[in-house]
Image: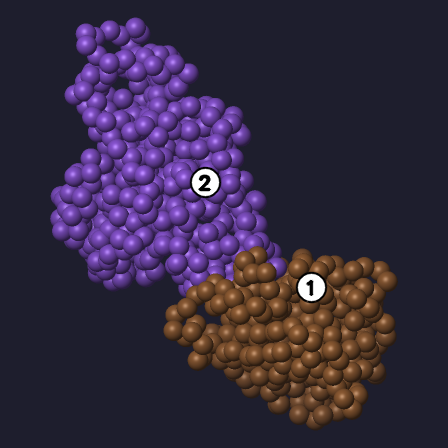
Chain colours: A purple, B brown
Amino acid sequence: MKNKLNGQSVKNLIIRGAHIVDPANKIDEVMDLHVKSHRIVKWGKDLAAEDAEIFDAKKLHLLPGLIDLHVHFREPGYEHKETIETGAQAAIAGGFVACVSMPNTKPACDNAQVVKYQMERANVLNFNLFPAGTLTQGREGKKISEMAEMKAAGAVAVTDDGNWVMDSGVARRVYEYAATHGLPVMSHAEDQTIALNGVMNEGIVSTKLGLRGRPNAAEDIATARDIELVRLIKCQLHFQHVSTIGAVAMIRRAKVAGLPITAEATPHHIALTDEEFLRYDTFYKMNPPLRTKADRQAVLQGLEDGTIDVIATDHAPHAFEEKDQDIEVAPFGTIGLESSFGVAMTELFHGRKWKLEEIVKKMSLTPAEILKKTNFGRLKTGEQANFILVDINKEWVFGEEHVHSKSVNSCFYGKKLKGKVLHTFVKGYQYTL
Amino acid sequence: MTQNGQNGKIKWTRKDLLGLRDLSAEEIELILDTAKSFSEVSQREVKKVPALRGKTVVNLFLEPSTRTRVSFELAEKRLSADTISMASAGSSMSKGESLWDTIANIEALKVDLIVMRHGSSGAPHRISTYTRCGLVNAGDGINEHPTQGLLDMFTLRELKGKIKGLKVVFVGDILHSRVARSNVWGLTKLGAEVVICGPKTLIPWGIEELGVKVVHDVKKAIDGADAVTLLRIQMERQNETLFPSIREYASTFGLKTELFKLAKPDAILMHPGPINRGVEIESALADSPQSYILKQVTNGIAVRMAVLYLLSGVIKNEK
């Protein structure tokens, strides 16, 4: 059993001398922050309050809590991979205060009851879970799900996740219906008839390894179709885990044309390429697959010019026994919550000289804006404390000891990281990592 | 003549043969040189040498195979090894045991070498790092079939005296062919000119980058060839929409006597088998004097003896 992270209820605490970076509030300086009864009272210079505990945070940075638009918490139905409890633990360990859960559960999250169940589980655990519901009933790509009821129950978006709606006629109606109820569509853009039984990116590496490939065209064709549907319908659409040169270019053009499109990239597409597959290790089997160096460069470029708005993990836990099978049989996916901030800091802040506020935007503020959750992605007086304290220069090597997910299928073991979350404050509880 | 795993140039150091992708030209030549000295054993009246006496070899065939399995079994017996063969049907893997557990159990039986055929590309590569047993890849998914590649090269070298500079053509389903892939790695390393021919649906993406030429017109491909290897069209792939019909495949890519005349007069014809007469190869051509299909089968034993012998030397050194 992994050691469980226990939150300390914050009653009256002054965090002293942290460098606060909060782009929404245009803060980028050393200040104090006062939390009382789980809520942010105020921030400023040299705060004093009678009987408040003092937490010395000199040399640390205080950032709004991270938000992940793309996680798989597997409950109900696949509790052997992850539960909402272990998923929340993984999130907190990575500095995430809120997550959007994908609906590929069993049963699928295609009705209000499942949405309610997931939210209640998260509430008991004191975690902010925003479920995504399905686009179609049973994720079968045929009939529209009960989106209005799901939204009323708390669903924040709709998606059929890995089952991209192949039938364009159905997709049109489903996206129109989602737009009717103001639910963003999250699109795992992939033409499954082309991706077929591929296990990795189709390219010179798959040819060398004798493995079946999933070509860029599978993502590009689906991206092109969805852009045209957005042009027709003007629905809000969010492209998940963008991984190809072509998709980045098309999304860039669509945004220039003013279409209501947003996009995410994963830490593994930011940091890795298909050459990782050379040892036939199934921990690198994910969908979309790790692509070529040129694709990775396009994703980085897209993040930097604003084409790609957010970093999301696609945290996809699978039991070791499931991953430890033949390459063709092993399921797709890597966990990502615990390593995401470290990877982003290493690759982008240190590696490509990003400003810290850019990291905050991609991992907290913009995800909150996409969800229209105005209490998140920024500090707000009177609201629950959802923020993190980080050491931007701490060097560490990612290992299984950092994993709090129920599953251990990470593609980042052994990676040297620089930048680590030390404390996560969620709903007024402090978790020390 | 080779001795103790060396041919005067290099010494064999690997405990596994996973594929020709990993090997250097020198290592491939060492195997071929070693096979030459073993090929004579099968000509004797007593077809046996004591090279692997006291060694135990397990043939783990997790995908149906007859010719490769029989060839390995005979190679092992002619080296005086103790051998046993297992198939997935009837083994505990059909009861859900994982490959790791199967290998661990085999290892616990104090086995020296495992010869493995597996339906999944990369399966032997993943296993090899976990087991102290020597491992021979007898075919993994659509990836490699290194001993087949080696025996093709051995046959070619035997008949042509060299490999460098030869034009070697492969016609058929390259995409799903582990035989073609092993040949491509091996032949390009030894300096042959490799030409791949088939419809685009059966050619892997970007294979030109491995140093081969892709030609879709079978006449152009065969023109001036020193050797032509035909690959079987896998009947089970007919419903994948890779070609319209067996009939059209046979008429566009099947090799006929007339077509084969475009190759050099002394060109040789090879096929890893099993052959589909009248599909990829005209029946008369398969039986013609230029066909060395059965010679390949004979040579397979010598090549496999050489591989087992070289690997067993390294395992011995480790103890």
Q: Residue at x 38, y 41 (%)?
A: A403
Report the side of B286 relative to A324 (left or right): right
Q: Quadrant of the C terminus of chain B?
A: bottom right
Which amino acid, by three-letter code, is at mark 2? Gly
Q: Position of residue A108 (x, y in %)?
A: 23, 56
Can residue B269 be seen by looking at this rendering? no
Secondary element under disc 2, as helix, strand or loop, is loop
Eye-nearest disc, 2 or 1: 1
Residue located beneath label 2 in the image: A399
Would you call the spot at circle 2 few (<14 residues within 10 Å), some (14-19), or many (20 or more)? Answer: some
Which amino acid, by three-letter code, is at mark 1? Lys
Secondary element under disc 1, as helix, strand or loop, is helix
Q: Position of residue A179 (x, y in %)?
A: 23, 45
Q: Residue at x 49, y 67 (%)?
A: B105
- Asked whether A36 or A189 is in front, the reply is A36
Which quarter of the figure has residue B229?
bottom right
Location of residue A126 with respect to A225 vertically, above or below: above
Which quarter of the figure has residue B256?
bottom right
Q: Residue at x 15, y 46 (%)?
A: A116
- Asked whether A241 or A54 is in front, the reply is A54
Give the chain letter at badge 2.
Answer: A
- Do tag 2 and tag 1 residues touch (Cβ < 8 Å)? no
Can residue B291 be seen by looking at this rendering? yes
Could you give the CA–CA distance between mark 2 and mark 1, rounded to whole angstroms?
A: 36 Å
